[in-house]
Image (spheres, rainbow, N blue to C red):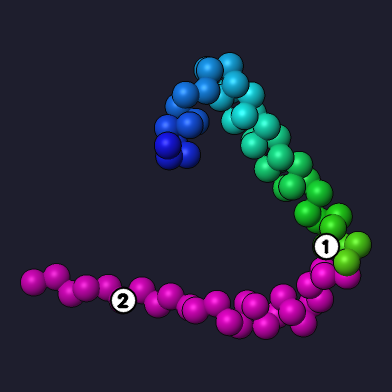
């Protein structure tokens, strides 16, 4: 039996609780990630930010001539 079929066999209430749990876990991760970066010393320095801005490709728009 596939994972999708197993999921579909769960009751609607159980699927709702499972989905809510996954969303709560994701929201928790978003809120805690900044604090975890600071705790592990992984916050970017100004030099890192500058190098990142330089590494991003620049887009040049060229107007097409109308005929």
The residue that label 1 is drawn on is: 37
Which residue sits furthest front?
1
**Vertical arrangement, residue 60 with respect to residue 30, above or below:** below
Q: Residue at horizontal 55%, vertical 77%? A: 56
Cα distance in 3D space between marks 1 and 2: 40 Å
Task: Measuring from the top left, give residue 59's x and y in whole percent.
Answer: 43, 75
Q: Which residue is drawn at the image coordinates 88% and 66% (left, top)?
A: 40
As drawn, is 17 to the left or to the right of 66?
Answer: right
Bounds of the magenta segment: 41-67
* Quadrant occupied by the N terminus: top left
- Quadrant of the rendered image containing residue 41: bottom right
Q: Quick one: quadrant of the C terminus?
A: bottom left
Asked if the magenta segment contains residue 62, the reply would be yes
In front of the other: 46 or 66? 46
Residue, disc 2: 62
**Above or below — where is 28 with respect to 65?**
above
Which SS class for mark 2? loop
Name the side, left or right, on which 22 lies relative to 8: right
Question: Looking at the picture, how far across and down is residue 19, in whole percent?
Answer: 59, 30
- List x then y, in percent, for residue 2: 43, 39
């Amino acid at each position: 039996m596939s994972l999708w079929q197993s999921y579909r066999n769960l009751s609607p209430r159980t699927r709702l609780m499972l989905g809510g749990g996954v969303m709560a876990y994701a929201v928790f991760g978003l809120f805690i990630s900044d604090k975890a970066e600071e705790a592990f010393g992984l916050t970017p320095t100004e030099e890192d930010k500058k190098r990142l801005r330089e590494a991003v490709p620049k887009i040049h728009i060229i107007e097409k001539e109308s005929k």
